[in-house]
Image (cartoon, grey):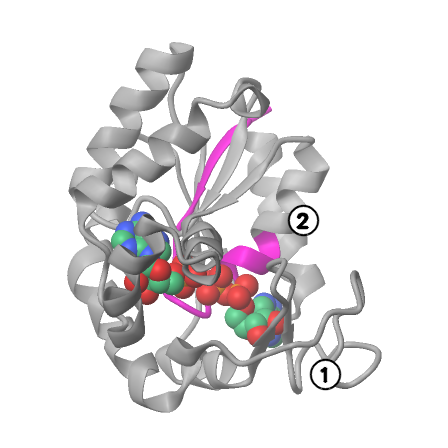
Amino acid sequence: MAKRVVMLGPPGAGKGTQAKRLAKHLGVPHVSSGDIFRENLREKTELGRTAEAYMKRGELVPDDVTIAMIRERLSRPDCREGVVLDGFPRTPAQAEALDAMLQELYQARVDLAPLIEVPEEVLVERLTGRRSCPNGHVYHLTFNPPKEAGKCDHDGLELFQREDDRPETVLNRIQVYNRQTQPLIDFYDQRGVLARINGNQPIEAVSAELFAALEKA
Ligand code: ADP
Ligand code: AMP
């Protein structure tokens, strides 16, 4: 079964939600570049300070910084048997770098790149209603509310709205995706690993489609 998975799709498509479930199912780590950046931001590391201005505007953090960060994460032993990547790669240069890294570290390649497809107007609703916990668990005010308002079901931490989920930044993030990340669809299609998944259905139904694609890969 596919063990090295790259989640593709626009911001708000449900990559994180599905990546968590998939990683659990496969017994491999879920590696979210956005989560790692946010953790560095909170801890005020040098990486966090570098990333902050880009993230606030909804722009991409430069490739060299992002690639170095992911290389460090993928080098850790827990990634040896597989990984579900979420939010990386986001540019053709990152995708090329990932291929080289997987080859060098594990003599392996990307097995599956599920593309979660959702119409643009749905994305805006999903992003502006998203609420997050500091440990990366994600909810939606309407579509996936926590059991107790404002509190994470898993760890009881207070939920917050990401600064870049405010309406002014959301549209820019979608444009950045269209401009810089969409070319990756062809990149993975040409390698024969792309799987189109209908993301505009309930979370369980998306997972069912995703897991079925995994069985076939
Ligand atoms: P991404 O990682 O692609 O940015 P998320 O997984 O964080 O997306 O999901 C964005 C928002 O949409 C979250 O608030 C999440 O709870 C909600 N969501 C995810 N999948 C679905 C779905 N299938 N239907 C409705 N809402 C969803
Ligand atoms: P996400 O949590 O995936 O929505 O990412 C939040 C923000 O982190 C993005 O808008 C970017 O500023 C930054 N980021 C996350 N992943 C990457 C990446 N692969 N390349 C560049 N910037 C990224």
Q: In this figure, which residue is indicated by the disc labeled 2?
A: 21
Badge nearest the viewer, 1 or 2? 1
Residue 200 seen in render: no
Work out which residue is located at the far bottom of the displayed protein and give it.
167
Above or below — where is 50 with respect to 28?
below
The amino acid on which the numbered mark 2 sits, given as a three-letter code, is Arg
The amino acid on which the numbered mark 1 sits, given as a three-letter code, is Gly
Q: Which residues are magenta?
A: 1-18
Q: What residue do we see at 59% from left, 54% from top?
A: 18
**Beta carbon of the mark 2 residue lies under 8 A of ligand 1:** no
Q: The N terminus appears in which quarter of the rendering?
A: top right
Query: Around disc 1, counting alpha carbons within 10 Å, would you say few (fewer than 14), some (14 to 19), or many (20 or more)?
Result: some
**Beta carbon of the mark 1 residue lies under 8 A of ligand 1:** no
Which element carries disc 2, helix, strand or loop?
helix
Which residue is nearer to you in this view: 146 or 47? 47
User: Looking at the rendered structure, which numbered label has been put on residue 20?
Assistant: none
Above or below — where is 181 with respect to 217?
below
Q: Is residue 7 magenta?
A: yes
Q: Quadrant of residue 179?
A: bottom left
User: Looking at the rendered structure, which numbered label has been put on residue 150?
Assistant: 1
Which element carries disc 1, helix, strand or loop?
loop
- Residue 83 at what x, y percent from top left? 53, 32
Residue 105 seen in render: yes
Q: Are marks 1 and 2 in contact (CB under 8 Å)?
A: no
Q: Is residue 69 left or right of residue 156?
A: left
Q: What residue do we see at 56% from left, 31% from top?
A: 216
Above or below — where is 82 with respect to 8?
above
Q: What residue do we see at 70% from left, 76% from top?
A: 158
Q: Is residue 1 left or right of residue 199?
A: right
